[in-house]
Image (cartoon, rainbow, N blue to C red):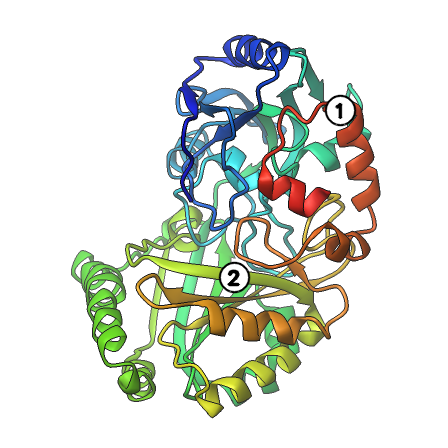
Amino acid sequence: MTADAVDVYAPRDTADVAEAVALAACTGRKVKPIGSGHSFTAVGQPVDLQLQMQRVSGVVAHDVSTGRVRVRAGTPLHVLNPALERLGLAMPNLGDIDRQTISGALSTGTHGTGLRFTGLSGFVVGVEMVLADGSIVRYDDAHRPDLVPAAALGLGALGVVTEYELQCVPAFLLKAHEAPSTLDAVLGSLDETVDAADHFEFYWFPHTDRVLTKTSTRISDPGQRAPLPRWREVLDDQLLSNTLFEGINRLTTAVPQAIPRVNQVSGRALSERTYTDSSYKIFATQRTVRFRESEFAVPRAVVPELLAELKAYCDRRDELVAFPVEVRFAAADDRWLSTAFGRETGYVAIHQYHRRDHRAYFDAFWSMLRSIEGARPHWGKMHDLTAADLRPRYERYDDFVALRDELDPERVFENPYLATVLG
């Protein structure tokens, strides 16, 4: 996503953000903050003024006894996570990428996996935000706590968030067990597996029955740390998962007929491995291969049905797909625009290599989802839904729109994406 004729400003702190917003608003200009630009949608696309938030970064305060941490909005997750560990703390759960800023991750509904844990916005207990008139507000336990569930996941539509207060937990390890399996075997025991595991996810290779599962168990004893040997980490996570995978995608882009066979070989080449390390090192993985992604949240019980339909589509070979399909799970939460609002949720994410046309595959996936009641798109990943489609999928949608009308009546923070999804 690109933007032309846009002014760029890098504020230093909350007061600087407030001054920039107030000046823009009084001259009729729209303002949009940006973090790492990780989203696949245009949720962060600027119109007139882009605020680059990199300097509004760092931990402001922490309390180990309560686990509360105040962090500036522009802090990247890959910086925040080791900083929390040095304080003896950790985020309760994380997604599988750590390149986003904390604000970008929270504002778009980033989540991890594990039915006992919400998405990242569920850990937010306080928000500091600059409103459209340049005023600074704070929602927390003492000031309008009823608005924290709205502001924690706000799509950048309510104001410019400058600081979050997070409910963290004592630092912990994760023991990860990765193992090959088959799609039928995984789906046959899916409920039992997801219920029993702290964190469970799997990757299915289209045009095959092959699956890679990853089960992670929380460990509080730091003495059990047993990370992968450096050579294995380099081989598996850098050479095979990134360098070789990039080569495979370039090859199959030139010769797409080879994709089913390549996926069979790749799926059967997977080996079992177990390793234990700091939680954030297990949650997140390094990805250098560029792709496009669409992810939808559906009621947990619907996941096998959706995967069966997706497999039938791939088996017909209407479209050849080299990228694995990622499946994760999360607990219900109370964030107004959360994809897991009010229900246990399964997530199905599809990907297409950036050099290949994604449209036929993604359109087919979206068509499958139209018959699933309550299917909700990840706000930072590609979808084709409008405000009219989204309104009945969120119980608090109209409440959020009404709050937006109150806080930003002149639409200082609007861009084309927000106009589409919020009306």
Q: Quadrant of residue 412?
A: top right
**In this rendering, would 167 be left or right of 228?**
right
**In this rendering, would 73 be left or right of 149?**
left
**In this rendering, would 188 be left or right of 403?**
left
Q: Residues within 10 Å of mark 2 (few under 14, many from 20)?
A: many
Q: Which residue is mark 1?
A: 409
- Residue 217 is at least partly visible in this image: yes
Q: Nearer the viewer, mark 2 or mark 1?
A: 1
**In this rendering, would 201 be left or right of 78?**
right
The location of residue 131, given as percent across then percent down, is: 67, 18
Residue positioned 59% across, 85% down in the render: 308
In the foreground, 296 or 328: 296
Identify the secondary structure beneath mark 2: strand
| Badge 1 amino acid | Pro
Q: CA distance from mark 2 to mark 1?
A: 31 Å
Q: Is residue 203 above or below residue 404?
A: below
In the foreground, 127 or 166: 127
Q: Earlier in the sequence, mark 2 or mark 1?
A: 2
- Residue 198 is at least partly visible in this image: no
Q: Quadrant of the C terminus?
A: top right
Q: Which residue is mark 2?
A: 294
| Badge 2 amino acid | Ser
The location of residue 385, given as percent across then percent down, is: 66, 57
The image's mark for residue 279 is: none
